């Protein structure tokens, strides 16, 4: 029960424990007002979310400053600590360039959602999300994945297009909640979920909601994390370099590893660039770079006048390199908007496509007449267990098509990016303590499945190859494209 001298008897009758509410059903006119931090998130610390903003949007120095301030943050009150983290993470960042709220944070919010809270929130079709975090951090997640009609959170102050690190006004007040309910014409029956320890918001819920359910931190600690298969919609695209949840201790470990990891990455890249595959693979394995390779027992016909076309799904820029390492043959890779720096340091030959379909087809046909070719018809990398739509261009130029299934396992940094510096992709991949590459070369497509011999359409061939790779990896096929990814994550079409 709540102890507050201003709470009258009728108000207290609204207070219930969420643990006793087992997926209660509500009418279509009921509006749920829920506290994001109390009703959905299992973790009680907001530090990781600000660290993601500081690192991904502000850079390494800003992230280090935020980490060094952590002991002080622990010694001040929650509201003061929130203001300090907000200032360090946002001050000086251009608003028009800030995409962490939609491209980075939703993944980590989803991974922190508790099943029990999620079940209660999703019982209502109409929802309002309330958060003490800045709106720009939570709005993308709440609207895209939770389906809220409105978000009640504080705005960031902007001067000449840059964040000044301060939030507008005080905490979300009861007046703003009342105005929002009236504006949305939400009806008279509102239900609230919050934490009684946050009396400022909880008092608002008691004032405006017919029923109010409370969640304690002890209850949240016992929640189960929401499994991926129960996400409201698939998490396919996300950006950012950090692959782990940057709690204070995990971030300390990262900064301790960074100097050694950077030197190790340069060493790994140098070994792969200067030494032949037979030697470099052993040395790289000794440094912790693991390659799990599988290929057909029967070698492909090497007496052909034309080379083989190896068709891979796309995880990092190193996919063609590991394909060449797997088959132990030199190959040529066609590239699409890859930085010149990565082309220069590539240990295999690369040829840049022109985006003109006829010219690219002739170019790839010429390369095949001279040797083996590796293509990644997704056109861009995909981190999650999904395959983007395969461009059918590769099916027009060869009947010797060999699918290659690729997966990557990392623990600290992603070796791909949509909005960051692509020239650093190999560096970040090799900065992982133990990056693992899984490469499986599948059986060559039978002639009946090709265009030239079997008379199949290019789309049929592309879809068949996509499905074969997806079945091998246990991934799911999608019809999403490179353009879809870059419009969602970077607001452009991916051209460098």
Image (cartoon, rainbow, N blue to C red):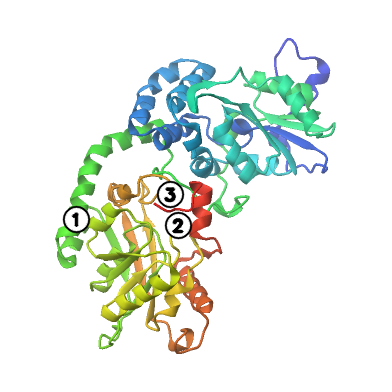
Please state which of residues 25 and 289 is positioned toward the viewer in this rendering: 289
Does 88 sit left or right of 211 as displayed?
Answer: left
Which mark is on residue 401? none
Measuring from the top left, give residue 304's x and y in whole percent: 28, 87
- Sequence-wise, which precedes: disc 3 or disc 1? 1
Q: Nearer the viewer's eye, disc 3 or disc 1?
A: 3
Q: Is residue 283 left or right of residue 403?
A: left
Is label 3 in contact with label 1 (beta carbons under 8 Å)? no
* Mark drawn on residue 418: 3
Residue drawn at the location 50% of the way across and 25% of the way down: 160
Mark 2 closeness class: few <14, some 14–19, many ≥20 residues within 10 Å: many
Reply above or below: 140 against 206: below
The CA span between labels 2 and 3 is 10 Å
Q: Quadrant of residue 313?
A: bottom left
In the orientation shown, which residue stands out farthest toward the right?
A: 188
Q: Please, what secondary structure does the residue beneath circle 3 have?
A: loop
Q: At 35% from the left edge and 51% from the top edge, which residue is drawn?
A: 415
Q: Quadrant of residue 127?
A: top right
Which of pointers 1 and 2 lies earlier in the amino acid sequence?
1
Vertical placement of 414 versus 448: above or below?
Answer: above
Q: Nearer the viewer, mark 1 or mark 2?
A: 2
Q: Secondary structure at mark 2?
A: loop
Measured in 3D between alpha carbons, the distance from the residue under mark 3 to the one under mark 1, in whole angstroms, is 31 Å
Residue 191: horizontal and vertical position, in percent? Answer: 77, 32
Circle 1 — which element? helix
Front one among 334 and 127: 334
Circle 2 is placed at which residue position?
Answer: 382
Question: Between disc 2 and disc 3, whose residue precedes?
Answer: 2
Query: Relative to residue 56, is residue 479 drawn left or right?
Result: right
User: Please, is residue 403 above or below residue 236 in the view?
Assistant: below
- Mark 1 lies on residue: 286
Q: Quadrant of the N terminus?
A: top right
């Amino acid at each position: 029960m709540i102890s507050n001298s201003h709470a009258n008897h009728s108000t207290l009758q609204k207070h219930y424990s969420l643990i006793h509410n087992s997926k209660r059903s509500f009418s279509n006119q009921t509006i749920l007002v829920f506290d994001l931090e109390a009703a959905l998130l299992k973790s009680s610390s907001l530090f990781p979310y600000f660290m993601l903003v500081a690192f991904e949007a502000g850079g390494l120095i800003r992230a280090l400053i935020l980490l060094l301030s952590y002991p002080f943050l622990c010694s001040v009150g929650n509201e003061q600590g929130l203001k300090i983290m907000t200032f360090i993470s946002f001050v000086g960042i251009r608003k028009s360039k800030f995409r962490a709220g939609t491209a980075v944070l939703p993944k980590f919010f989803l991974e922190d959602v508790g099943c029990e809270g999620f079940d209660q929130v999703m019982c209502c079709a109409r929802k309002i999300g309330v958060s003490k975090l800045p709106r720009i951090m939570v709005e993308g997640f709440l609207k895209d994945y939770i389906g809220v009609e409105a978000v009640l959170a504080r705005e960031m102050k902007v001067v000449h297009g840059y964040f000044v690190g301060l939030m507008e006004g005080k905490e979300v007040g009861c007046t703003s909640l009342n105005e929002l309910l009236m504006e949305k014409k939400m009806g008279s029956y509102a239900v609230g979920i919050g934490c009684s320890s946050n009396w400022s918001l909880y008092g608002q819920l008691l004032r405006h909601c017919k029923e109010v359910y409370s969640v304690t931190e002890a209850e949240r600690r016992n929640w189960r994390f929401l499994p991926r298969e129960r996400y409201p919609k698939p998490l396919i695209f996300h950006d950012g370099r950090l692959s782990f949840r940057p709690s204070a201790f995990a971030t300390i470990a990262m900064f301790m590893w960074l100097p050694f990891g950077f030197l190790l990455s340069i060493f790994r890249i140098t070994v792969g660039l200067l030494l032949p595959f037979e030697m470099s693979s052993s040395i790289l394995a000794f440094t912790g770079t693991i390659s799990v390779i599988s290929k057909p027992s029967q070698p492909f016909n090497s007496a052909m006048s034309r080379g083989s076309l190896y068709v891979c799904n796309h995880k990092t820029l190193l996919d063609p390199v590991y394909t060449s390492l797997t088959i132990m043959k030199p190959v040529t890779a066609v590239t699409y908007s890859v930085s010149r720096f990565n082309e220069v340091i590539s240990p295999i030959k690369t040829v840049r496509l022109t985006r003109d379909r006829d010219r690219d087809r002739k170019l790839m046909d010429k390369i095949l007449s001279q040797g083996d070719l590796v293509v990644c018809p997704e056109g861009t990398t995909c981190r999650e267990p999904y395959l983007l739509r395969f461009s059918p261009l590769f099916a027009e130029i060869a009947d010797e098509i060999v699918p290659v299934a690729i997966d990557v396992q990392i623990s600290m940094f992603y070796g791909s990016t949509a909005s960051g510096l692509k020239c650093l992709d190999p560096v970040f991949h090799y900065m992982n303590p133990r990056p693992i590459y899984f490469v499986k070369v599948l059986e060559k497509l039978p002639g009946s499945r090709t265009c030239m011999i079997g008379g199949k359409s290019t789309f049929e061939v592309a879809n068949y190859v996509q499905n074969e790779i997806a079945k091998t990896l246990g991934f799911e096929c999608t019809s999403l494209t490179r353009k879809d990814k870059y419009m969602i994550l970077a607001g452009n079409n991916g051209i460098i």
